[in-house]
Image (tube, rainbow, N blue to C red):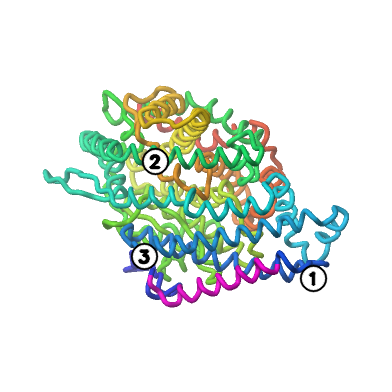
Amino acid sequence: MKDLSRTWDLETIFPGGSRSPQLEAYLTAIEDDVRGLSKRVQAEPLAGAVEWAAFLDEVQVVMRRLRQSGAFVSCLNAQDVQDKQARIVGGRVKQLQAALATVLTRLDQRMLQVPQIYWDELLRSEALRPLAYNLDERRLRAREMLPPEEEALVNDLSVDGYHAWSDLYDATTGRMTIPIEENGRITRVSPGQAQNRLYDDPDPRARAAAMTRWEEAWADEADFCGLALNHLAGYRLSLYRHRGWDSVLKEPLRNNRMSAESLEAMWVAVEEARERLVAFLAAKQKVLGLDRLGWQDVASPIGKVERRVSYDEAARFVIEQFGRFSPRMAGFATIAFTDRWIESEDRPGKRMGGFCTSFPDKRQSRIFVTFSGTPAGVATLAHELGHGFHQWVVNQMPAMTQQYAMNVAETASTFAEMIVADAAVRNAPSPQERLVLVEDKLQRAVSLLMNIHARFLFETRFYEERRRGIVGAQRLNELMVQAQKDAFGGALDLYHPHFWASKLHFYDTRVPFYNFPYTFGFLFSAGVYARALEAGPGFEDPYAELLRDTGRMRVEDLAWRHLGVDLQKPEFWRKAVDAVLGDLGEFLRAAG
């Protein structure tokens, strides 16, 4: 595998980018279909299982096509944050999503009108049995919503209200550039490029300087970001109040199909592990030879891996390691690399972060990263490919059963990342490089168990204060620093006050509380990975079955059926924490 392209191919989806005539025709067809569905769901009676199934088939076709449109716009916005036409098209897609949400709201109301005895009979029918869990879930959730006319109004107003604040945040931060010193000269780079330099530079003075510039840049945007964050939270709180919901966690827990008891059990295990993680950070500070450990040092390399990994080498390594566990995973990864499903080029104008998105009509995925040639970059590739494999496994299933929640989506990605990270440690050519890779694994545990917990603490406390009114930028800084101190056990000397502004996850209107699902996925995947190591290659089929069930049952039932564990008790989570910290002793001994 040589000379792989570093840019993805979007032309095979819709040629012409944001001005694609094919995309225009595709969206127009969706508009017509949504209008037709809207008229029928209000006018036509759905008498029996066959009629219900036929109507639901049409709904799911539109769901797939709308998902494909949204994925394409996400890719356009990510590859070029200055693509103004993509933002315009994105607004149109959001309007269509709101219109379909209204159709689904009215469909839910139809479900509520069916007497329970007939409803149970419908779900037992051959035509609807594959959707039984998802339809019953929709019906139960509908009981907790506003009347359909009011929910329809909410959907319509959200396009230019709620979602618009998120769009404005993206547009504002997308135009940002941050001055970074390189070879004695100041270069202005995108936030995504600055973030790579902030954490990857081996020179602590360079990291400290980059951190100062990073904080200054976000401080300049703090008033706007604070306004956006307050209005997004205010919208949610108002909507929850009208629905009669008394907890800001009701929606994220419901979306992730998990109980508050499971979330609490997970955080208990995380908090119990804090002393071990603080010990790791103290040892890392010693290895780095630092008098003080700052936020920018937590993810920094402890030493230089002499050989930078080329993109082609990373692809070969990931495919090889996937193949040791699952030929299907390796086959999927091969297609993703060779068919140009991955955008990995390091260049200006790209958005920060990484993601994987799916095109269900094409049965393809696209992966977005900025590949840096580091071991962490290889792990990130594996992580996003794990997301893609998850979708690959469920591609043949009905659209409604493909709507797996974020927490279990992170399971497949983290599982893939663990395969590659463990292999990198095993194959390290020297003790020094092995230690660097062990540290990288442990640092990811810090990120998922401490950094994510800080985000969760910040959001829960912010929402409590937001109930009483607008929370100013300075107070947001204070809440952020206190959350970081609590989650990191006071292990750092310098924190990141404007993290609330720089982390786009706080502004994503698709996913309220875009934090704890990462920790769930990290630890749940550790349990799945431990089972895979015990079973060997024979676990490939059970793993695929677990992934197929992620969109059609609650996570407690998923864990019990496939792993025989109770997620509402801390025991599973404690064992998972022990597994992800399994290399801690080796690192502490090496650090002396």
State the image quarter where residue 87 is shown: bottom left
Q: Which residue is drawn at 64% across and 71% down?
A: 36
Q: In which quarter of the image is the C terminus?
A: top left
Q: How many labels does the image show?
A: 3
On residue 50, which mark appears? Answer: 1
**Residue underneath mark 3:** 85
State the image quarter where residue 42 is shown: bottom right
Residue 508 spot, x, y in % from top left: 47, 47
Q: SS at mark 2?
A: helix
State the image quarter where residue 181 is shown: top left
Q: How far apart are marks 1 and 2 (CA)?
A: 54 Å
Q: Residue at x 32, y 52 (%)?
A: 174
Q: Write the start and end of the magenta stretch as one range.
A: 19-40
Q: Give the camera-side residue of 537 and 442.
A: 442
Q: Which residue is drawn at 54% across and 63% down?
A: 96
Q: Is residue 20 magenta?
A: yes
